[in-house]
Image (tube, rainbow, N blue to C red):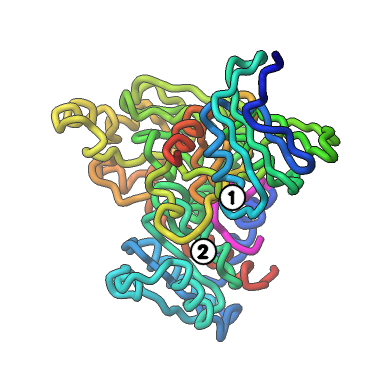
Amino acid sequence: MQDVISIKDFDRADIEKVLENAKIMEGYTKGTGILEAKILATLFFEPSTRTRLSFESAMNRLGGTVIGFSESGSSSVAKGETLQDTVRIAEQYADIIVVRHPRDGAARLAAEVAQVPIINAGDGVNQHPTQTLLDLYTIKKALNTIDGLRIGLMGDLKYGRTVHSLAYALSWYDVALQFLSPPGLEMPVHIREDLTEKEISFQQVEELEDLKVDVLYVTRIQKERFPDVEEYEKVKGSYQITKESLEFLGGAKILHPLPRVDEIDPEIDSTHNALYFQQAGSGIPVRMALLASLLGWEP
Amino acid sequence: MKRELKISAIKNGTVIDHITPGKAFEVARILGLEDFSAPISIAVNVSSGKSGTKDIIKVENRELSKDEVNRISLVAPNATVNIVKGYEVAKKKKVEIPSEIVDILPCSNANCITHFEPVKTKFQLEGTSPMRIRCYYCERVLTEEDIKREIAKED
């Protein structure tokens, strides 16, 4: 693989390879010289602190260095330069480029133009493949498997980029999916069709109490998705995980791409269910694995 | 008395027949006919026993390639292409939807990068009945309805 643009470019073998390499990278998180003298350019046309810091940390731990910008206001884009030109310039200065951009498809276009590897760190509402890979890595690390699991996806399933990508990636595995979302924010038809095509069992449940899962992936429900604030206030309580929810969630592991607002009560943080901070930490070995292998490293 | 043809027969070249009525100018735009030096005749809303009315385009002295004519398939899916040699139809073929559709229609996703950067749109064919194409860049799926709407915008 030359670039990491979309989770749709990954089949099961590709995903497994990344997860195996990430496991090897766990052994190098105190530092290694695998990418010594290599330079990563981070082109962040819109801010994303966690993803950018995680890529920078991963590159630094691999012994490489990082250049870049964290918002387009401080780059030549503010002067009207095209993305294509920005990428052509950046590749003169760096061996690999990470792009985050507010427009859907920006990373694919960058990859088409660039000679060096491109990693998509989020293009509009379209894709954020490294998030999905670290989600899978977190699940596999905690439960030793992905096959055979019952996985719940909860929250805004209509607009949520992370749940779309995750559902797609999970369709390579033998899993049973359960969806819980407010009315109007259900999983889009084209994703349900993809799942049906791959013979993945999925069902929409009505209440939090109906979920019978090993893993629950929680996402934020944005106020602005509702016609008015009252509507939002009415439903939001039904999609919050509190200590009481654990009675019927049992030992289910809870993931969240973060940042959270009030979907998960902080009192969950100290329970064995909470996996979301480890999930954020998984960003390091997974992104180390991707950076290293795109630059020719092999285990 | 024999009725006269609205546009005369050509000796050599390409006749695109059974174009969806009203779509001849769109077809001409897609094929870039305005840049051709060959004589071109366009007939719009001609009566046709087969489908009521149809449009026809005749391009003299130029044999359009398969790839060229397939570019019109989204606009005129029922068109037939006749290659004419010495006033005779030498080859007749139906248009086919190509697996990659380049620079024919805009992406229906208003946030797609193709609306903001100097780049040709590109779609991959995912299905023909019903028609489904996917933007190569933003991955948005366009249904038959979306395609019709986007092509109409180009008129």
In this rendering, the label closer to the viewer, 1 or 2: 1
Answer with the quarter of the image where residue B51 lies: top right
Q: Given the image, what chain letter belongs to the residue carrying mark 2?
A: A
Residue sitting at x 68%, y 29% = B17
Visible in this render: residue A260? yes
Looking at the picture, does residue B89 appear above or below residue A257? Answer: above
Residue sitting at x 52%, y 37% = B141
Q: How many neighbours does mark 2 have within 10 angstroms: few (below 14), some (14-19), or many (20 or more)?
A: many
Looking at the picture, does residue B24 appear above or below residue A207? Answer: below
Which residue occupies the foreground of this view, B99 or B137? Answer: B99
Horizontal side of A6 relative to B82 (left or right) equals left
CB of mark 1 within 8 Å of CB of mark 2?
A: no
**Residue reaching furthest front?**
B1
Q: Given the image, what chain letter belongs to the residue carrying mark 1?
A: B
Q: Which residues are magenta?
A: A1-12
As for residue B68 lying within the magenta part, the answer is no
Main SS of the magenta part reads loop
Answer with the quarter of the image where residue B133 lies: top right
Visible in this render: residue A148? no
Residue named by callout 1: B32
Image quadrant containing the N terminus of chain A: bottom right
Horizontal side of A69 relative to B3 (left or right) equals left
For the residue labelled by badge 2, is the local secondary structure a helix, a strand or a loop?
helix
For the residue labelled by badge 1, is the local secondary structure a helix, a strand or a loop?
loop
